[in-house]
Image: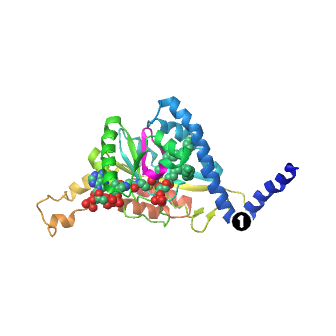
Amino acid sequence: MEVLWTVPLLLLIPLLMWTSSTFVFYFKKCFYVAYMMCLALLAIPLCVLKSGGRDVENMRIIRSLVRHVKYFLGLRFEVSGWEHLQTEGPYVIISNHQSSLDVLGLMEILPDRCTMIAKKELVYAGTVGLVCWLGGIVFINRKKTSDAKSVMTDAAKTMLDEQIRLWVFPEGTRNQRGDLLPFKKGAFHLAVQAQVPVIPIVFSSYSNFYLRKEKQFNSGNSSGLCSCFNVFLCVRRSSHAEVLSLLRRHQIEDPPKDRHEGDDVRRHHIPLRQILQRDALGLLEHLQLRNPEQRADAALNTNH
Ligand SMILES: CCCCCCCC/C=C\CCCCCCCC(=O)SCCNC(=O)CCNC(=O)[C@H](O)C(C)(C)COP(=O)(O)OP(=O)(O)OC[C@H]1O[C@@H](n2cnc3c(N)ncnc32)[C@H](O)[C@@H]1OP(=O)(O)O
Ligand SMILES: CCCCCCCC/C=C\CCCCCCCC(=O)OC[C@@H](O)COP(=O)(O)O
């Protein structure tokens, strides 16, 4: 008897998928969260067996478990400049942050011994939270700057002691407007304190397949033949040395403390994060282009 009821129910799902884009949106979102939760459940014992607890090496397991999730959501990633991540030793990665889907792109290119900075609320996200903790993610309290700063200062030391790379979302929150929010400063303090390079990574806009406000998560083009959307990931070359040499070339240095505001040096002083923000913003503009070929050309032209 029950079987008779489940058949029409099962038929209802494809019917709704076919007719309602809002249903597709919620279906895909729920699938994503539920599936990640299940994967996390699988990851927990594997991580514990591998490292006995919290360890950045667990990111290898997490990365390999997450990499196929993109196929279910109809996403593909094109990566340019991957070689820039092959720099020896620790560095800070900064990237734009559009959605929790960023985790898929992040895992696509995550270098070894790299973990992230995240808001502390994430640790309470059930099995996913536990996996984040096991993967060595550094949790900060965004509402308490002094706490966040001291956690990040400790992280700078750990980066060097344990040769760890850190991925920071310097906008500090998700942003799907197609631009960059003003960068927070923590990532740059981190790089200066640890004296490591900053590597910017830009994700192209998700707006051709995913719009949170409009409840759109497309499943293919109108012909239904192609259900695949490309996300373009562009890794820039290590910018820290580049920025320092730029500053030196223009004889711009951190203004000595005893100089006052109106001083020439102060007026010409360009903070590191401002230069990187400009660099990332320019690249983001290029990546807004819809046509993948155009995007590839743009990236090749800017990614020297
Ligand atoms: C098989 C498994 C299956 C599934 C499992 C999946 C697993 C998934 C795995 C992995 C996924 C991971 C995905 C993670 C994604 C998470 C994303 C997020 O959570 S994004 C939110 C958190 N991120 C941030 O907030 C950015 C970092 N934030 C900062 O850097 C800020 O700067 C912060 C919090 C430290 C302070 O923020 P302020 O809002 O107060 O603003 P400000 O202007 O930046 O700083 C205020 C003053 O403090 C100084 N300051 C900041 N940091 C400093 C420091 N480290 N040292 C000294 N001074 C510092 C600054 O210079 C500024 O002072 P003056 O204005 O310059 O005088
Ligand atoms: C028992 C609690 C259940 C909570 C369920 C949430 C579980 C999420 C499950 C699957 C998604 C896996 C990817 C997790 C990583 C998502 C990180 C993320 O994108 O956090 C948002 C944060 O950057 C910015 O937050 P705000 O925009 O400032 O707010």
The residue closer to the viewer here, 208 or 176, is 176
Decide if ligand 2 comes within 8 Å of the CB at mark 1: no
Secondary element under disc 1, as helix, strand or loop, is loop
**182 lies above or below 47:** below
Q: Residue at x 57, y 64 (%)?
A: 212
How many numbered badges does the structure rendering display?
A: 1
> Which amino acid type is shown beneath numbered disc 1?
Ser
**Residue 20 visible to an observer of this rendering:** yes
- In this rendering, position of residue 282 left or right of residue 42: left
Residue 142 place in picture, x, y as percent: 38, 56
The residue closer to the viewer here, 18 or 229, is 18
Q: Residue at x 39, y 45 (%)?
A: 166
- Verify whether residue 211 appears in magenta: no
- In this rendering, position of residue 199 left or right of residue 265: right
Residue 207 place in picture, x, y as percent: 56, 64
Q: Quadrant of residue 16?
A: bottom right
* Chain part drawn in magenta: 106-122
Residue 174 place in picture, x, y as percent: 47, 60
Q: Residue at x 35, y 44 (%)?
A: 91
Task: Tell which quarter ligand 1 is in.
Answer: bottom left
Q: Which residue has dot 1 on it?
A: 20
Give the class, few, some or many, for how many residues have Cα within 10 Å of label 1's Cα (few <14, many ≥20).
Answer: few
Residue 203 place in picture, x, y as percent: 48, 56
- Verify whether residue 109 appears in magenta: yes
**127 lies above or below 170:** above
